[in-house]
Amino acid sequence: MRTRTVQKLFGYWNSVRAQRVAPRRFEIEPARISDLLPETFILERAELTDLRYRLAGTRICEQFGIEFRGRSFFDGWGSEDSAKIAECTHRVMNDGAVGLLAIEASTARGRVASFEVLLLPLTHTRDTVERVLGAMTLLSDQPWLGQEPLVSRKLTAHQVIWPEGRPHAIAQKIDRQQPFAPHIRHARIVRSDRRQFRVYDGGLAGTERD
């Protein structure tokens, strides 16, 4: 995560998530991220394989020269890039992953601007992920941006990040395995900086000393 907007939005989302697969849409407080809003967006699941912009920040719309609201997230990509992005968003929507994209957007005259894109899962009224909170922010300043519309997009890099270090369903399954061995079942739980550790005595604990 290279940009301040992406780093700050991820940190806020992760704090609200509190070890769940995703926070609820209405737990996200715009006032807490007011300085990021011009570069953020929300996607909603329109069909099984489509996501559409429900909201898009003013800076994003100005930079691209279009109104994103109601448009498909997959508009403007080549077929190969669309397939890679679809796989990434599938992981976000179905497995609780975080998506991180690097893209280049071009004008009709061949001017190019590079962006970092963050995709974060959100639940809405049910426990399934139906929304995506995202950010789209410039990697380097382009003084001409906003004077010409960006008409095409190219994916230059992409990755999937697991906030728990592994898919959420696997983490849950491991954490819920029963029964525990006696020394684990009676372990102490220690929490630090939103992390949780299971600690149990061993070694010389409980032995007499001279």
Image: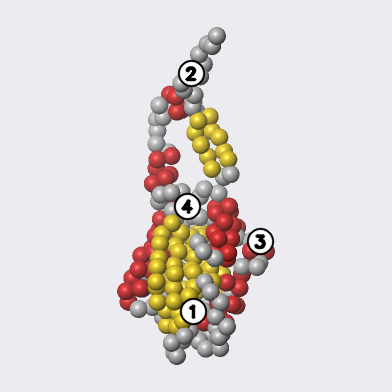
Cα distance in 3D space between marks 3 and 1: 28 Å
Judge whether 145 appears above or below 125 on screen: below
Amino acid under disc 3: Arg
Can you identify the residue that label 2 sits on? Answer: 204
* Residue sitting at x 32%, y 76%: 79
Q: Are marks 4 and 2 in contact (CB under 8 Å)?
A: no
Task: Say which residue label 4 marks.
Answer: 163
- The local crowd at label 2, few if under 14, some if 14 to 19, many if 20 or more residues have their Cα within 10 Å, is few
Q: Which residue is mark 3?
A: 32
Sequence-wise, the earlier of marks 4 and 3 is 3
Q: Amino acid at mark 4?
A: Pro
Mark whose residue sits in front, 3 or 2: 2
Mark 2 and mark 1: span between their CA atoms?
61 Å
* Amino acid bearing label 1: Ala
Of 114 and 185, nearer the camera is 114
Q: Quadrant of the C terminus?
A: top right
Q: Residues within 10 Å of mark 1 (few under 14, many from 20)?
A: many
The residue under the point 36% across, 65% down is 87
x, y percentage for residue 158?
40, 65
Image x and y of residue 37, in percent: 61, 70
